[in-house]
Amino acid sequence: MPKRQTQKIFEELLHSGHLAPSARILHDGEFNLVPISLDAPPTLDKKFSDYDEVEAEQPEVEPHRWINHLEDILQPKIMDEFKDYWGNSQEIMGDLLVFRMEREVFQFKQEIAIAKLKHAKKARLALCDNGVGGEFRIRQLEPLALRIEDEILDVEQIATLSKEEQQKHLSTRTLVREHMRSIRIDPNKAYYSIRLGAERWRSVESAEKLREILGRPLSVSDPYCGVGPALVHLLKRRGLVGELLASDLNPDAVELLFDNLRRWGAPNIPQSVAPLSEVSPGWRVGVADALELTNNSELKGSTDLLLINLPHDTMEHLPHLLPLLRKGSPTLVRG
């Protein structure tokens, strides 16, 4: 039937009891196919006589959860034995799927990765998060499943790819969108969590209230800025940020920060990683140790809004950072 008549005929079939249960409307060019119950009479009511009956195959219903895909891979006995440990701790970052698992089911990490990638149709690479490590607390990510076009490869199949193909397809550099803003990230090089997006948005709301109180653009310092996720929302608000200090001790994070700042339209951002410097009047960006910022007398008492994204050592670092805050007017510290 013509698409414009679909709703009317659907309702009439439903009321007459002839609509197929749990079946979906199918598309056929300019027409739609409405499923008829197998129990319907060979000849339908006269009001349906203008429409042709055709045979069509209903596609299989896609599983609603990744665990349904896992049930197709592992034996029911295994699924039941470990039913308390499958969990669903994961983050979608652009085309990356990063997940954690309980140690009790670590032996099934390959199957879990494939099941998750089958469910997440837009994800390219499934990586197991084995915790953070190193000086900059970077995620230890293990690639376990890769999608190339319509095929999903496991670890053994990935190993058969050439080094060039592996370098290309296993790249963890990707673009994420957060509150309608794009951010370049690489979780193998700099920490980023999409779960903190709501907290970053609340920082924007708090910053706007502070601007209303002060009646001018803010001087913002983000000495643990990473790739800059907290800054993108602040900078997109016209007239919210006046002066800016954006730094991180991780050079890889700063490289991504510079990439993001350039894409967000910031002027005079260096093309390569560089120490903290003033790139425009009042704008300082680059590699720096947050604990040494107050050694620069120009930075003392210059900040209205101080962002501290350092969940484990905030209280230890805070005394070194408070001298950055401006005196004689309201200021704000956000974690």
Image (tube, rainbow, N blue to C red):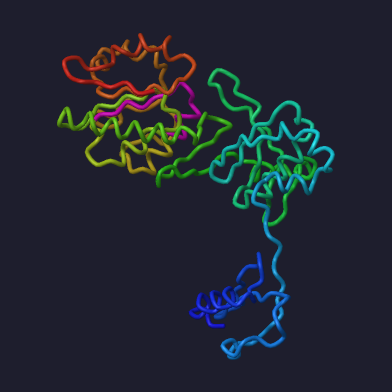
Quarter of the image for residue 107 reads: top right
Outermost residue on the front side: it is: 16
In the figure, 116 relative to 28: above or below?
Answer: above
Give x and y (percent) for residue 252.
50, 29
Q: Which residue is drawn at 71% across and 83% down?
A: 41
In the figure, 175 relative to 242: above or below?
Answer: below
Give x and y (percent) for residue 57.
72, 72
Residue 163 or residue 56, whichever sits in front? 56
Residue 6 or residue 191, whichever sits in front? 6
Where is the N terminus found, in terms of image quarters?
bottom right
Relative to 83, 192 lies left or right: left
Residue 73 or residue 222, whichever sits in front? 73
Q: Residue at x 64, y 43 (%)?
A: 125
Count of numbered labels shown in the rendering = 0
Relative to 68, 186 lies left or right: left
In the figure, 324 relative to 115: above or below?
Answer: above
Quarter of the image for residue 258 reads: top left
> Is residue 61 located in the magenta-colored stretch of the structure?
no
The stretch of residues the image draws in magenta is: 243-257
> Is residue 251 located in the magenta-colored stretch of the structure?
yes
Residue 286 or residue 302, whichever sits in front? 302
Give x and y (percent) for residue 5.
50, 80
Where is the C terminus found, in terms of image quarters?
top left
